Amino acid sequence: MTLLATRGLTKRFGGLCAVDGVDLELGDREILGVIGPNGAGKTTLFSLIAGSIRPTSGEIVLDGHRVTGLPAHRSVRAGIVRTHQIVRPFGTLTVFENVLVAAMHLSRTATGHARDRAAEVLEFVGLSDRQGHYPATLTLAGRKRLELARALSTGPRVLLLDEVVAGINPTEALALTALIRRVRDERGISVIMTEHVMPAVMSLSDRIFVLDRGKPIARGTPQEVVANPLVVTAYLGTSAGEGAGP
Amino acid sequence: MIVRSPSWIWRRVDLALLAGCVVLAVLPVVLEPSAYTHNQLTFLFLTSAGALAWNWLGGFVGQVSFGHAAMFGVGGFVAARLMLSLHLPAPLGWLGGAVVAGGFALGAHPLLRLRGPYFSIATIGVGEASRLGFTYWESFTGGSSGLSLAIDGDLQYQLYWWALALAAAVAAASLAIRRSSLGLKLLAIKADADAAADVGISATFYQDLICVLSGAVVGLTGGLYASYQSFIEPTDMFGFERSITFVLMAVIGGVGTPLGALLGAVVFVLVRIYLLASYPDLYLGLYGVLLILIILFEPLGLTGLARRGLRWVRRAPAPPGAAS
């Protein structure tokens, strides 16, 4: 069953086509990895789906409803939430409040309910013992967990993770990878993730979607994708004298 | 920069505020101060209310407005017009002024997508345009010669309590906003408007809301000020100096803190009383010095200083011989 789909999603910045006619399907309880070289348009694709920017053309459908061009705060209410590659915690709010404020839009009348959910989510990501602290006191891995907790407490159906594993040490990366799997298994949330850390994305993803210069060039299981010559070329280039493909 | 206090401070702030209001409410009856003191206190309450309401937008949301005189002026002139032309009783006039000023503030909607210094610069433009517009709209504002209201001695005397009630209500509302879920959302928007949108908080909606509320209260203050002065003219009501005054009081008192503007207003009125008459130039110079010192050393102004003091007192060891 398809939960989220994009059809011919395109974003032009002047003459540059950052995302070019992307058709993407995300199944219910699926983890979809989006990979591609730097500048392939991964983050732009995320920004489009999350409503941070409006597409030039194409559409986004969530569970049969068009959500194309909804502003970010309404996309969140529809059930699509994103995290940022460079974490953006609210510095003047405590860890708990960071998560609480994200839980509020669901239960505008019952703050008590929002508090319960925030506490539960903090427990889930393993930040309960830091809830009274300010984000600046957390390690980078801690702040990535906070970013994840904040997104989860909005009660999403689709979670867009922009390079959550990048930039932290291998032990933390493994723990975070396990956490993302639990997000899907225990909370039933579908995930689209971009990642440069290949072990993480290969082990987590049910399917992989490869972007290069805004265009989808390959899709399939992780094994199929790494064996695809187009993907190898996009990442590593071709040696002199060799053709650009099979 | 952490702009909030721990809960043990809150309870004392509530009590101090309540006690202060009670004392000030009975003061004229018990002590029977001179008309001069009575008037200066009324002026202090009005100034406080305006500065506190400015802080909702400038402090809570972090959109520093240099154009709030526009709402002050609109509130004042609409109130005066309602009283002069329609012969409405003063409180209804003030209310009408507040409503129109709130609507006028909504005109800032396109500006609110700007952030930081860009927003501030744009508000200077709006403030100055309003001043010129209303100065030339002679049939409404009386132009440069302004409007004179009938002088009503009883109202002048009662204005003390009206102004006190307004200041108290605005102070209580400031505390309530800061402690509510709305306050948390505003802090989030101030910290990062885009990240706030990514967790379902519409920065546009809440900025508009706070801008209207802040504008309406400043307009209400303008209406009471019109009755207080009995004579208003556009250059004074809409002047850039008035806009600057709101900013100064909030910054001196502690921008973004719920009651800092109150402290700022007290300092402002005191300095004004003691220096304006004898050394009008020194008066502005002193503000300049104060502003530089605060921005350099204590971004949370007097509130920041007070908190440091409180923490220092709390951490200080108990004097020998004191009960443990």
Image: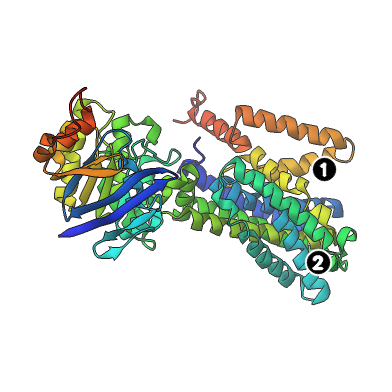
On the picture, is B104 further left or further right than A60? Answer: right
| Residue type of the residue flagged with mark 2 | Leu
Please tell me whether residue B133 is drawn above or below residue B12 in the rendered image.
below
| Residue type of the residue flagged with mark 1 | Ile
Please tell me whether residue B284 is drawn above or below residue B240 in the rendered image.
above
On the picture, is B233 further left or further right than B289? Answer: right
Under circle 1, the secondary element is: helix
Quickly name the residue at label 2.
B155
* Residue found at x 89% / y 41%: B277
* Residue found at x 65% / y 47%: B122
Q: Position of residue A222 (x, y in %)?
A: 12, 39
Q: Position of residue A126 (x, y in %)?
A: 24, 39
| Residue B216 is at least partly visible in this image | yes
Q: Nearer the viewer, residue B63 or A63?
A: A63
* Residue found at x 69% / y 41%: B248
What is the chain letter for disc 1? Answer: B
Q: Nearer the viewer, residue B159 or A120?
A: A120
